[in-house]
Image (spheres, rainbow, N blue to C red):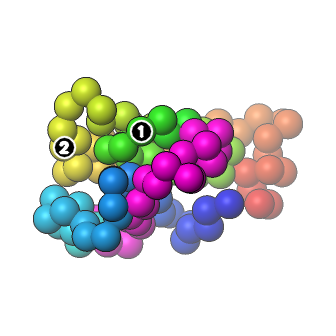
């Protein structure tokens, strides 16, 4: 599982090599430091099944946002167009706060 500070969102950027972050990704990571944790992933053919089954990533380029405990990852598939990293991080860079109900109170408050 992905572990984050209390008020952080995690963003994984999938690329063919994963060696170097694009300028846009580096800038977004710098601009959102403390709120969004950004990482790069090399989308290797041998790992494709894991990424597809675990998070729903089918190809590169893609970005996945993890917005907090109990939420599903948000997958942005960039196969059709170039990914606008800054726009996506602005759009998805805040945590999802779940509604408290009697059956989710323990999970959310004591996790």
Residue drawn 41% across the image and 60% down it: 42
Left of 6 or right of it: where is 12?
left
Q: Earlier in the sequence, mark 2 or mark 1?
A: 1
* Quadrant location, the N terminus: bottom right
* Quadrant location, the C terminus: bottom right
Q: Out of 85 and 101, give the one closest to the viewer.
A: 85
Left of 101 or right of it: where is 18?
left
Look at the numbered disc 2 and give the secondary structure of its residue. Answer: loop
Residue drawn 83% across the image and 51% down it: 106
Residue drawn 33% across the image and 53% down it: 15
Reply yes or no: does residue 8 show up in magenta: no
Residue 46 visible in image? yes
Give the crowd class for mark 1: few <14, some 14-19, many >=20 residues within 10 Å: some
**In the image, residue 54 lies at what x, y percent?**
64, 44
Q: CA distance from mark 2 to mark 1?
A: 16 Å
**In the image, residue 92 lies at what x, y percent?**
36, 44
Q: Mark 2 sits on what residue?
A: 84
Q: Mark 1 sits on what residue?
A: 59
Which label is found at residue 32? none
Q: Out of 57 and 16, give the one closest to the viewer.
A: 16
Residue stretch in magenta: 31-54
Determine the image quadrant of residue 19. Answer: bottom left
Determine the image quadrant of residue 26. Answer: bottom left
Q: Out of 23 and 15, give the one closest to the viewer.
A: 15
């Amino acid at each position: 599982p992905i572990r984050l500070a209390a008020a952080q969102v995690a963003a994984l950027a999938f690329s063919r090599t994963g060696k170097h972050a694009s300028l846009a990704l580096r800038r977004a990571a710098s601009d959102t430091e403390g709120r969004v944790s950004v990482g790069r992933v090399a989308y290797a053919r041998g790992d494709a099944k894991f990424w597809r089954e675990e998070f729903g990533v089918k190809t590169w380029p893609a970005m996945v946002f993890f917005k907090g405990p109990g939420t599903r990852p948000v997958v942005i598939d960039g196969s059709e167009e170039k990914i606008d990293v800054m726009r996506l991080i602005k759009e998805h860079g805040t945590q999802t706060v779940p509604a408290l109900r009697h059956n989710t109170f323990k999970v959310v408050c004591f996790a």
